[in-house]
Image (cartoon, helix red, strand yellow):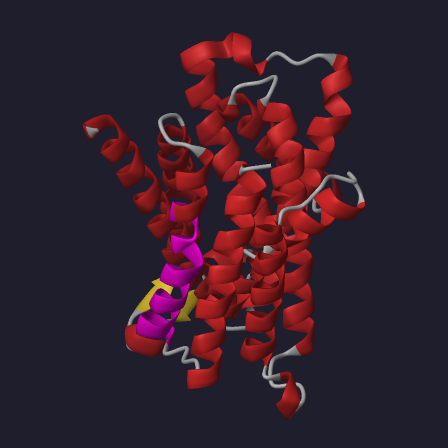
């Protein structure tokens, strides 16, 4: 009982740290740091921390077979590089809460993948989750009023949801043959290599890290170097929550894990409201709740397949 509670606390705090990291990330990008560079820094920093941890704990787990490499490359590029990049691009144009809600519709797209690509039977619960989730998205976007959200921001968030779908589908396949820590270390490492190829480190704008950022929202009046915001994203927004989530996953069922994971978009919206004054109107707030119900049902149905 106490052991399960400890793992639940790990996951809750992991979701909390992931959610609050959106605030310094958004502020860092407002200072002039691009989403591409921020993603590059985040994945490399997290990779170094996680690699050292896994290597010191069980370096044998990092060994891979040649046949595993293509899957790991897909996992690293889509599951880490694309998810992080598209999310950062989305929050540049959308409220943090809305971007996270759209991203976390991944279980809905997994349901469609299972039904139409894998040709698996999908339960009625899954279809209810799909219908309810999409209805909630319609409410958030308020489509009857025309384009009320930034169109490009919505596109980035939807593509992020598709990338997160890939992360779950490929990750489940890999974790079946490798430890979750080793799988995540390889994913982050390949993501870091991907960004190093398209954005060599000798082109990195180091001077921008010293730019003084005048914080906005509730933090207005405080000024910090961009470096401090980026350091927060790496340590408190990536390395620490990954450790918490990995430790939490060890002692909980998939159903409990997915349910607790839904805290992240909720907390992200709350932190966006508290620190950045990002508000939702009543209809959008109802839409968020409806989407969360849809995600919950889709998750439950997927777990029971």
Q: Is residue 151 left or right of residue 245?
A: right
Magenta region includes residue 264: yes
Picture quadrant of residue 121: top right
Magenta region includes residue 229: no
Residue at image coords 46%, 59%: 25
| 116 vs 151: above or below | above
Residue at image coords 30%, 38%: 8
- Whether residue 244 is visible to the viewer of this picture, yes or no, is yes
Most distant residue in the bottom direction: 145
Choose between 10 and 63: the one closer to the eye. 10
Q: Main secondary structure of the magenta part?
A: helix
Residue at image coords 54%, 38%: 303
Residue at image coords 50%, 11%: 59
Q: Where does the image place residue 170, in percent across and percent down from the top left?
A: 67, 34
| 272 vs 231: above or below | below
Most distant residue in the front direction: 124
Range drawn in magenta: 260-276
Picture quadrant of residue 243: top left
Q: Quadrant of the N terminus?
A: top left
Q: Where does the image place residue 304, in percent across and percent down from the top left?
A: 54, 37
Choose between 72 and 249: the one closer to the eye. 249
Most distant residue in the top direction: 60
Q: Is residue 292 left or right of residue 102?
A: left
Q: Quadrant of the C terminus?
A: top right
Q: Where does the image place residue 160, in percent across and percent down from the top left?
A: 64, 56
Q: Is residue 115 left or right of residue 85?
A: right
Choose between 232 and 140: the one closer to the eye. 140
- Whether residue 281 is visible to the viewer of this picture, yes or no, is no
């Amino acid at each position: 009982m106490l052991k399960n509670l400890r793992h639940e606390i790990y996951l809750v705090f992991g979701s909390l740290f992931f959610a609050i990291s959106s605030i310094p990330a958004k502020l860092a990008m407002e200072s002039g740091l691009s989403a591409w560079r921020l993603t590059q820094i985040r994945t490399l920093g997290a990779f170094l921390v996680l690699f050292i941890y896994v290597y010191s704990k069980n370096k044998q787990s990092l060994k891979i077979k040649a046949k595993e490499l293509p899957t790991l490359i897909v996992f690293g590029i889509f599951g880490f590089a694309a998810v992080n990049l598209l999310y950062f691009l989305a929050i540049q144009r959308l409220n943090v809460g809305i971007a996270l809600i759209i991203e976390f519709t991944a279980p809905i797209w997994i349901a469609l993948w299972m039904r139409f690509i894998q040709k698996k039977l999908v339960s009625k619960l899954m279809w209810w989750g799909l219908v309810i989730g999409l209805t909630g998205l319609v409410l958030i976007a308020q489509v009857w009023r025309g384009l009320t959200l930034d169109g490009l921001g919505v596109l980035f968030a939807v593509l992020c949801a598709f990338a997160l779908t890939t992360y779950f589908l490929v990750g489940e396949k890999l974790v079946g043959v490798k430890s979750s820590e080793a799988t995540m270390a390889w994913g982050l490492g390949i993501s870091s290599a991907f960004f190093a190829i398209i954005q060599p480190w000798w082109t990195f704008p180091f001077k921008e890290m010293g730019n003084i950022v005048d914080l906005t929202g509730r933090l207005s009046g405080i000024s910090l170097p961009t470096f401090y915001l980026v350091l927060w994203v790496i340590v408190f927004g990536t390395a620490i929550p990954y450790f918490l989530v990995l430790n939490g996953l060890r002692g909980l069922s998939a159903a409990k894990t997915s349910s607790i994971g839904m805290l992240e978009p909720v907390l992200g919206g709350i932190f966006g409201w508290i620190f950045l004054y990002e508000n939702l109107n009543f209809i959008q707030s109802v839409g968020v709740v409806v989407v969360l119900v849809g995600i919950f049902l889709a998750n439950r149905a997927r777990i029971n397949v």
